[in-house]
Image (cartoon, rainbow, N blue to C red):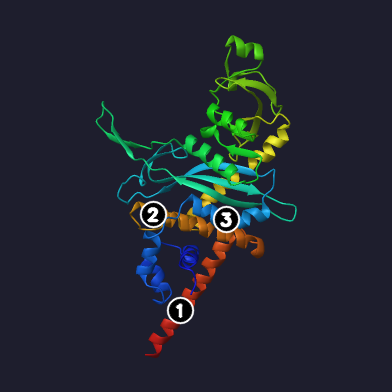
Amino acid sequence: MQDKLDLYTDYLLSSFGQTSATGLSRLVNGDISHDSITRLLSGNEFNSKVLWQKVKPLVRRHETTDACLIFDDVIIEKPYTDENDMICWHWEHSQSKSVKGVNMLNAFYHTQDSGMSQPLRIPIGFQIILKTVLFSIIKTKKEKRISPVTKNEMMRAMIAQSIHNQLKFKYVLADSWFGSADNMRFIQKKKKFFIFDMKTNRQVAISEQDRNAGHWTRIDEIDISDNTPVKVWLKDLEIPILLTKQVFINKNQSTGVRFLVSNDFSLSDDDFTTLYKKRWSVEEYHKSLKQNAAIGKSPTRTLKTQSNHIFASIMAYIKLEKLKFSSKLNHFAMKSKIYLAANKAAFKELALIKAQALGA
């Protein structure tokens, strides 16, 4: 009998709508009861430690010393599910508003050894944000939730755990949300390199004399050449860092400016660009979880069942990542192929029903 978690991840990859224990049971003609799938989701503790145990053999085969560990969070929208510590309101930067759902922080590994035609891009850790602290805003008397642990604290703990697990990596990549002085200081002490995007209002000094005198200037107001890394001092950070200003053209032909910083002084501007582009792989991971692995399509309501469904979706993504090397197809092409096969089967079944109706 196929392992139930393996079967459930196959079900998530082959589904195109809501997923449920009953739906899976019906799909296999009742060979596995819906109760057994419910027990899978309610009777286990699938967490970040279990994820590492699952992916460790694959990672060990392909890890490299110059690999990147990428951090980003994602919101899985659940607008119609009852609110609890996990399914609650979170700020969605892309929409500039709060949305109801599950917020998850991911540690994502990007590596490519000499024998690989394309990189392995795989999650090695995750943390679901639980907003367990309730408080009321005095002015509005509106109740809100917060997590007792910040995402930056979670990220540092996940980096420490990755080092404890002897994961090989050189760089930590993240967007401006994680570009705090505390994070830079922590990564420096761990003898790793960071590359962070910076908010334009961050304060820097372009010389040690200015730093010592407290002469700080906004990053977007300092006079530096484009695409030419320079040594600067960031306010509240003891160590100097390397800063590069990159001007680029957006898809809508507008001009964008990005400021990247690192503690690796050997980087050229091209190095900055090449390495930071790898951060985009975590965005594709989030997109694949939503569109290919049914992460937001479970009606489960309790913290444990919803969390375990999310874990199963992560494992479904990993299955696609393994298959891309043998199939030579990306995740979305594989899902399209499954969808086409399902449509053909449905079309054939409809033709059979019509033929039977005409013959009656």
Q: How many marks?
A: 3
**Mark 2: secondary structure:** helix
254 in relation to 340, above or below: above
Quarter assignment of residue 140: top left
- Amino acid, disc 2: Gln
Asked if residue 84 can be seen in this view, the reply is: yes
Q: Nearer the viewer, mark 3 or mark 1?
A: 3
Quarter assignment of residue 256: top right
Residue 306 disc label: 2
Mark 3 Cα shell of 10 Å, populated few (<14), some (14-19), many (≥20) = some
Outermost residue, front side: 164
Residue 315: % across, % down: 51, 58
Q: CA distance from mark 1 to mark 2?
A: 34 Å
86 in relation to 259, above or below: below
Are the residues at dot 2 and dot 3 in contact (C-beta closer than 8 Å)?
Answer: no
Q: Nearer the viewer, mark 1 or mark 2?
A: 2
**Mark 3: secondary structure:** helix
Q: Nearer the viewer, mark 2 or mark 3?
A: 3
Residue 357: % across, % down: 38, 85
Quarter assignment of residue 321: bottom right
Task: Please identify the quadrant where the C terminus is shown.
Answer: bottom left
**Mark 1: secondary structure:** helix
